[in-house]
Amino acid sequence: MVRILILLSLFILPSHAEPENPVKWSLIQQLIKASDIEAQITAHFGPFEEFPKDKAKIKSEMEDAKLSPTEIAERLNIMERYYQETQKLKGPIISNILTEVAEHYDRTFTEDELRTIITSFTNPAMKKFLETSKTYMPDISEKLTSDMKKLLKPAHAQMVNQLMQVEWKYEKKSEGGPQSPQKASA
């Protein structure tokens, strides 16, 4: 049902998003479809988006954890209700985002530019590139985040220490508190 609403929203965006030029409007719709924005937006709804596929695995994990059948059923019912609620809420959110995207494309691109972008998205090599990017980019992003945390941790710790020293310095002036973190711990 949600997929139908999303697909409809690609073609029936609110009229305020619709450009005055019907040719351009058609190109914008084509670009939204070709760029697979729906999948990109849906990815931001989180891992619970996969609940129907993962339900059996989740149940098996609960059984392995030796939960009672009654507790398993209750937990799965709660998860199912949450999933259904998110599906109801998702349609309007996606529609609003698609409206904003369409308005942005209308303001930003000419008809010729839209055609060029659509051509690139529908090119078999580009499709392959985008598809493979979906699989390796999350891993690269996770690695980058991890590496950056490791690299920045000493600098962050130094900044926090220096900020604490400034705080203690001003506390000493106003309250007669400790002069430095080292003296405070002594």
Image: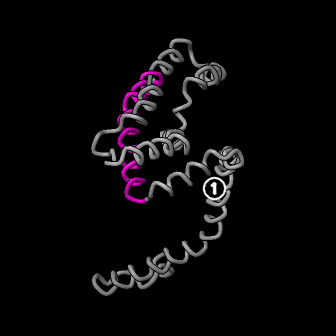
Q: Is residue 20 above or below residue 182?
A: above
Q: Residue at x 45, y 25 (%)?
A: 4
Position in image of residue 127 (x %, y %): 67, 45
Among all residues in the image, which is located at the extreme top?
Answer: 70
Say which element carries label 1.
Answer: helix
Q: Is residue 89 magenta?
A: yes
Considering the whole magenta stretch, tell me its main secondary structure.
helix
Please state which of residues 123 and 79 is positioned toward the viewer in this rendering.
Answer: 123
Position in image of residue 40 (x %, y %): 53, 44
Query: Which of the colour schemes (rainbow, by chain, secondary structure, one colour) is used?
Result: one colour
Task: Count neighbours of disc 1 (C-alpha within 10 A) and say few if under 14, some if 14 to 19, many if 20 or more.
Answer: few
Q: Is residue 85 magenta?
A: yes
Q: Which residues are magenta?
A: 79-108
Q: Residue at x 56, y 30 (%)?
A: 50
Please state which of residues 139 and 166 is positioned toward the viewer in this rendering.
Answer: 139
Left or right, 56 with respect to 171, comes to right
Q: Amino acid at mark 1?
A: Ser
Among all residues in the image, which is located at the extreme bottom?
Answer: 173
Q: Residue at x 45, y 41 (%)?
A: 29
Quadrant placement of the N terminus? top left
Position in image of residue 45 (x %, y %): 48, 39
Q: Is residue 2 above or below residue 19?
A: above
Which of the 4 image quarters holds residue 142?
A: bottom right
Please state which of residues 144 and 129 is positioned toward the viewer in this rendering.
Answer: 129
Q: Is residue 165 above or below residue 29?
A: below
Which of the 4 image quarters holds residue 178?
A: bottom left
Please state which of residues 124 and 131 is positioned toward the viewer in this rendering.
Answer: 124
Residue receiving disc 1: 141
Total number of numbered labels?
Answer: 1
Position in image of residue 69 (x %, y %): 56, 12
